[in-house]
Image (cartoon, helix red, strand yellow):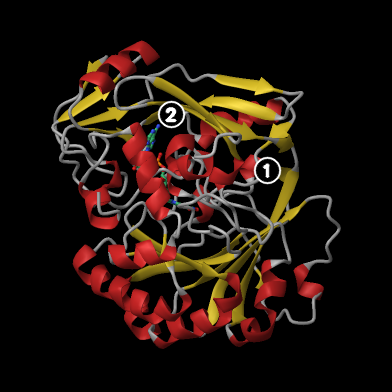
Amino acid sequence: MTTAAGPRTNWAGNIAFAAPDFYRPATLAELRTMVARARQLRVLGTGHSFNDMADSPGAQVSLAGLPPEVEIDSAASLVRVAAGLSYAGLAARLDRHGFALRNLASLPHISVAGACATGTHGSGPANQNLSAAVTGLELVTADGDVVELSRADAGFPGAVVHLGSLGAVTRLILELVPSFEVSQRVYEDLPLDVLDDHFAAIMASGYSVSMFTDWHAPRLTQLWIKSLAEDGTPPVTEQPWFTATPAPAARNPVPGLPADNSTAQLGEPGPWFERLPHFRPEFTPSAGDELQTEYLLPAEHAVPALRQLQRAGDRIAPVLRICEVRTVAADDLWLSPAYRQDSVAFHFTWRPDSAAVLPVVSLLERQLAPFGPRPHWGKVFTTPDADLHASYDRLPDFLDLARHYDPKGKFRNAYTARYLGC
Ligand SMILES: Cc1cc2nc3c(=O)[nH]c(=O)nc-3n(C[C@H](O)[C@H](O)[C@H](O)COP(=O)(O)OP(=O)(O)OC[C@H]3O[C@@H](n4cnc5c(N)ncnc54)[C@H](O)[C@@H]3O)c2cc1C
């Protein structure tokens, strides 16, 4: 087992982890011993969350040193994958065997376990978040025992989006679909008014659609439409509601940044894992120098919520790099931000200035309050714990599950105290 000393931060650098100890076990046996001995502990994935959820007052452990197993069960269309593996490390291997994941987030750099722990999502009105693909998981619980859970277990829907609070997840079983090709086109300058009557139609105009605005003007700066290569949908430009201009060259969704780190566009078909994320694995995703916030709320409130945000546009724009709007299909996972509601997700990539950003985050929460916004668990938010409890009716059951697997609170930290009350 290797250990590391010295300052460590999350990917964005806005959180300096306070955990005094850091471990990187090489085997499951080492991990079990370490978990059993630790007084307090939390697993660190790839550290792409923007808050302190992966920190611990005791030890932090990375599972990146465990064997990067990928076992495909072709007959059942399932893969059992080591939790520390990233989507970038997994996707090409699946594709070589003729399989795909249904959807991906905007970047493939994140660990499968960290993404599923937080309800990470992509876009598409028929696409659930990445956690919804989990059919089973294996975790090392507080006393070092290995527990396997599957969809047949009563607590399973509570255990998938677990925020790191149930134990160290070592393996996940994910549902697969046959490999598919996607082509991606970017359009520019769609007036916001068009969304009043056509929001749902535009969001359904591709397999996965993202709208971007900088809130400097009432328009979408870009519209990214990822279509199944064979679906025969008429080009978006031929649809009567569409007045945007096709981008003449590849684009980066973040204004002012070169397109090099973005996935191929201009309608060139390619494999699912090279089109569904916006960013390529070999480059720094997004701006690199940023904070992020995101809220999910019922999809039917998308347009009034957009109008509410527009009213705060002059406060948002000065601290914003880019705002992205996506859709996520409902699921049944207790702490999923899309729990039992088809959702619209309003995402904000901020300039890296917490002092300037936090008041705007609170303002957004007030603006969106009438629509019952659920924050992305892995991003910056100031939602009071009472509001979170009101948003998630299975939260008490989740806390029972956490007490069951972790009776002494080994996996608790400042984040769980602040937001979950434990
Ligand atoms: C540039 C960028 C783009 C992003 N794009 C998207 C996007 O498109 N959609 C979206 O929804 N989110 C997005 N995110 C957010 C990101 O997907 C989540 O924050 C996700 O949790 C990151 O995974 P991670 O491996 O880095 O997790 P970490 O940040 O390392 O950990 C997150 C939580 O999971 C727990 N955890 C991690 N691994 C384990 C494990 N094996 N066992 C137990 N607990 C574990 C940690 O303790 C922590 O509580 C983006 C983030 C960045 C930086």
Marks 1/2 in contact by CB < 8 Å: the verdict is no
Image quadrant occupied by the N terminus: top left
Q: Quadrant of residue 31?
A: top left
Q: Nearer the viewer, mark 1 or mark 2?
A: 2
In the image, residue 4 sits, relative to residue 193, either above or below, namely above
Q: Disc 2 designates what residue?
A: 84
Q: Quadrant of residue 327?
A: bottom right
Q: Disc 1 designates what residue?
A: 272
The residue positioned 72% from the left and 73% from the top of the image is 201
Tag 2 or tag 1, which sits nearer the N-term?
Answer: 2
Residue 121, x across and y down, in percent: 53, 52
In the image, residue 314 sits, relative to residue 255, either above or below, namely below
The residue positioned 57% from the left and 48% from the top of the image is 277
Circle on res. 303 = none
Label 1 residue near ligand 1, CB within 8 Å: no
The residue positioned 34% from the left and 68% from the top of the image is 387
Q: In whole angstroms, how far apart are the C-alphas of marks 1 and 2?
A: 22 Å
> Please, which residue is most extreme toward the right here?
232
Q: Is residue 11 visible?
A: yes
Residue 415, x across and y down, in percent: 25, 50
Residue 157, x across and y down, in percent: 53, 44
In the image, residue 261 sits, relative to residue 320, either above or below, namely above
Q: Amino acid at mark 2?
A: Gly
The secondary structure type at the circle numbered 2 is loop
Q: Is residue 340 left or right of residue 387?
A: right
Q: Amino acid at mark 1?
A: Trp
Q: Is residue 48 visible?
A: no
Label 2 residue near ligand 1, CB within 8 Å: yes
The secondary structure type at the circle numbered 1 is helix
